[in-house]
Amino acid sequence: NRVLDVMLDCLEGAVQLPQHSVEAYVHLIRKFNRSALVQVLGFKFQGHQQTNQKPPESLYQLVAVLCKHKALSIKDMYPFLSSSDDDMLAEFNKFYEVLLKHIERMRIKVIGKGNPNDPEQKEATIDAAPHADTGGDNQKLLVTAALLAEGDWESAEHML
């Protein structure tokens, strides 16, 4: 596993290189056991999660490159990625409730009687700041973005 880890580190640094260089690394990585590949990559993601550090963008690109070249299945990586599906659903529901409240305030303002002193009819503004960073620590979302950037719609579709 140590040799595989070193190979993955090399490929992670080379994902920006020309395609033929990347393909050479992928060809070598395919020689390793696929379950070992999933475990090593999973430990990399979980290590960042446990230390509350954001994984580098190159790690997401690495997964996307390996999936695109069919050296890795995103279905195998999915359990190692955070946030949990339940956490993502709870975050979405919370955001959705806030959005519905803002829409209701805007509707009241538009069809209201026009009393400017009525607190229900104050101008409704949506503050994007609390939601601007939504997804920044969601590894599943960031892997999906990397898959789309790499052009691997099949794997990205599984994530969606």
Image: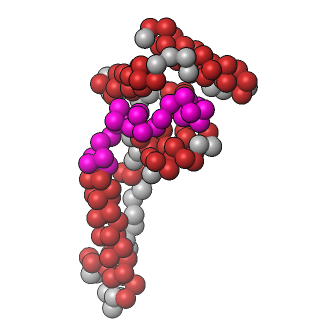
Residue situated in front as seen by the camera: 36 or 65: 36
Q: Residue at x 60, y 16 (%)?
A: 28
Q: Residue at x 56, y 21 (%)?
A: 30
Quadrant of the rendered image containing residue 36: top left
Magenta run includes residue 82: yes
Whole-percent x, y for residue 80 in the image: 35, 32
**Is 41 situated left or right of 98 in this image?**
right
Whole-percent x, y for residue 21 in the image: 70, 20
Q: Quadrant of the N terminus?
A: top left
Whole-percent x, y for residue 88 in the image: 32, 49
Q: Which residues are magenta?
A: 65-88
**Is 3 situated left or right of 126 in this image?**
right
Magenta run includes residue 24: no
Q: Residue at x 39, y 47 (%)?
A: 134
Whole-percent x, y for residue 43 in the image: 36, 21
Residue situated in front as seen by the camera: 119 or 43: 43
- Work out whether residue 66 can be spotted: yes
- Work out whether residue 122 can be spotted: no
**Is 38 situated left or right of 112 in this image?**
right
